[in-house]
């Protein structure tokens, strides 16, 4: 008797979200099966891989990373062009670190003006990340959304404290996409999506940032949360969880001890940059296997490795 493969069919599917503009726009989501289950159904678009840049010189980054970008890292516009031309990411994430109230505290107007210059200088879609200071990010994203009208960017991220203003300005007024950020909890993720819906934001304009952790640092909670979200979205047809997921992997992996300990402090661990890449690749590979539709990375070598992995899983 011939072997017959069992196929798992789901009643739900993940929304397709497009960001960027024109022929250079990119799509997230669209799948109706678990990640990379090509044998069960439509896996949607391949995971997108973005590279992180800053609006200020990356003084805290490793010397090896600074050397990759050289003088281009002194100017975010030149940096964005360099990244696009040399490494061909699916998108670029501009992190507005210079607006942090505990740092340079740049004004929303100054940060937004720079974001506009970056958006105009590149063809690939743009994700704009804030300072992780919720009060400042509210003002920041309102201004960024205004000056980038027509660019269809992803604003990373809106939280429960500021979703009303970011959702109203970013999506309803200026037609961008918003990332709904929660803290590794399916109920919190669902609640924030529902709150955005009640504000008037459509599911197709929401991408979820459900939280992250470097592997070895409580990552099992991240994996289990993503699994539960995807199973509820697909198996239970829960429309409040049918949004694609974006995960800013680099924000976590380059701050753990394996990435920050120098060779002098931990000679037995070997090269510091290789450790950082290993943490970033391991975490990114894990989140796309768990359901992330896009990841944000810092090292171009990490991006290349994760892209090869995703392509191999899809094509084999």
Image (tube, rainbow, N blue to C red):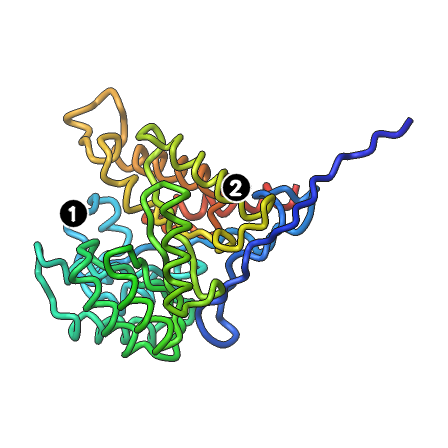
Q: Where is residue 89 shown, x and y percent of the image? A: 43, 58
Q: CA distance from mark 1 to mark 2?
A: 29 Å
In the depicted view, which residue is nearer to us: 83 or 149? 149
How many C-alpha atoms fall within 10 Å of the one at disc 1: few (<14), some, or many (≥20)?
few
Residue furthest to the front in view is: 198
The mark total stands at 2
What SS does tag 2 mark? Answer: helix
Residue appearing at x 32%, y 59% in the figure: 156
Circle 1/circle 2 CB separation < 8 Å: no
Q: Check the picture and name the quadrant holding the C terminus.
A: top right
Q: Quadrant of the N terminus?
A: top right
Which residue occupies the foreground of this view, 282 or 144?
144
Circle 2 residues within 10 Å: few <14, some 14–19, many ≥20:
few
Residue in front for this viewpoint, 257 or 266: 257
Q: Residue furthest right?
A: 1
* Residue occupied by mark 2: 309
Image coordinates of residue 34 in percent, x first then y, are 59, 43
Report whether 267 appears left or right of 151: left
The residue lying at 26 percent from left, 47 percent from top is 65
Quadrant housing residue 194: bottom left
Rendering quarter of residue 6: top right
In what element is the residue under mark 1?
Answer: loop
Q: Give me the residue at 15% from left, 27% from top.
A: 264
Q: Quadrant of residue 117?
A: bottom left
- Disc number at residue 26? none
Whole-percent x and y of residue 291? 50, 44
**N-term mark: 1 or 2:** 1
Which x, y percent locates residue 88? 44, 60
Q: Residue at x 27, y 26 (%)?
A: 270
Q: Which residue is mark 1?
A: 60
């Amino acid at each position: 008797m011939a072997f017959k493969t069992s196929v798992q069919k789901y009643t739900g599917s993940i929304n397709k979200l497009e960001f960027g503009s024109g022929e250079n726009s990119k799509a997230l989501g669209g799948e109706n099966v678990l990640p990379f289950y090509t044998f069960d159904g439509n896996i949607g678009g391949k995971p997108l891989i973005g590279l992180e840049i800053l609006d200020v010189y990356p003084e805290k980054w490793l010397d090896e990373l600074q050397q990759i970008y050289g003088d281009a890292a002194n100017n975010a516009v030149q940096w964005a062009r360099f990244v696009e031309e040399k490494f061909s990411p699916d998108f670029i994430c501009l992190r507005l670190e210079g607006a942090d109230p505990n740092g340079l505290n740049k004004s929303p107007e100054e940060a937004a003006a720079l974001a506009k210059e970056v958006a105009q200088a590149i063809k690939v879609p743009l994700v704009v990340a804030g300072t992780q200071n919720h009060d400042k990010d509210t003002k920041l994203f309102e201004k960024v959304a205004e000056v980038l009208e027509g660019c269809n960017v992803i604003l990373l991220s809106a939280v429960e404290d500021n979703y009303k203003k970011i959702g109203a300005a970013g999506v309803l007024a200026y037609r961008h996409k918003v990332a709904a950020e929660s803290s590794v909890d399916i109920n919190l993720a669902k609640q924030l999506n529902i709150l955005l819906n009640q504000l008037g934001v459509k599911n197709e304009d929401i991408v979820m940032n459900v939280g992250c952790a470097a592997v070895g640092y409580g990552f099992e909670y991240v994996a289990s949360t993503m699994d539960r979200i995807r199973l509820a979205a697909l198996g239970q047809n829960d429309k409040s969880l049918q949004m694609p997921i974006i995960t800013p992997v680099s924000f976590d992996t380059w701050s753990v001890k394996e990435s920050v300990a120098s060779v002098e402090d931990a000679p037995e661990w070997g090269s510091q940059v290789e450790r950082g890449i290993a943490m970033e690749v391991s975490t990114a590979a894990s989140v796309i296997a768990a359901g992330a539709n896009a990841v944000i990375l810092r090292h171009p070598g990490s991006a290349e490795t994760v892209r090869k992995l995703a392509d191999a899983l899809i094509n084999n």
